[in-house]
Amino acid sequence: GFFTGSYNIIQGKIKRESTGEHLYDISGKWSDEIYIKKHNAKEKDVLFDVKASRIHPKIVAPEEQQEPIESRRLWSKLTAALKINDQDVATQEKNKVEDEQRVKSKSREDQGLPHVPRFFEPKGEGFDIKLENISPDAQEAKKQITDFIFNTPTSV
């Protein structure tokens, strides 16, 4: 990628929530193997082997039911152009999306309004999910997360 010189890189830290203590590091490629190691340790273990895993089809709402800023809907015209190898239309569609985002950003800036991420809030060097008190029960947690993502009002 742009910053690392490599593609599909994933990096992360696992911290103890109560103290902020750095416990583990996660690294690798989301398209290959993802590793975990104790912070300050030398040896790493495979956390997830993408190539050995089974691919589950995505479950997504039809485009007309998606919010205007959802990636599949937002970039659908660009994606369609790329699929037929029409670089001119793809570039035009990319520019349309980016120009619209610049206009919205400038409008917020002119009004003195900060960009407020929908699902996460800045905390130190990273971000915390805005969802609190996630249940330890897997089924209840899944319901909480699904409701949080799909029933949270947006300001588009």
Image (cartoon, rainbow, N blue to C red):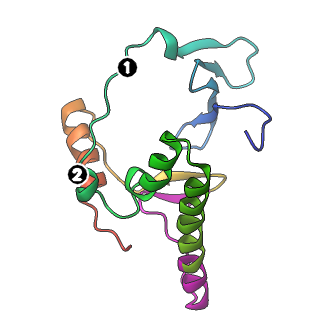
120 part of magenta stretch: yes
Give me the disc on residue 55. Answer: 1
Q: Is residue 121 magenta?
A: yes
Across and down, in percent, residue 87 comes to 61, 49
> Which residue is outermost to the top?
52
Question: Which kind of residue does numbered mark 2 sit on?
Answer: Asp
The single residue placed furthest to the bottom in the displayed view is 111
Name the one closer to the observer, 41 or 84: 84
Q: Which residue is mark 2?
A: 147
Magenta region, residue range = 104-123
> How many numbered marks appear?
2
The image quarter containing residue 140 is top left
User: Up-down: is 2 above or below 13?
Assistant: below
- Quadrant where the image shows the C terminus: bottom left
Q: Is residue 98 left or right of residue 6?
A: left
**Is 98 above or below relative to 108?**
above
Which residue is painted at 77% across and 43% down in the image? 3
Q: Label 1 amino acid?
A: Ile
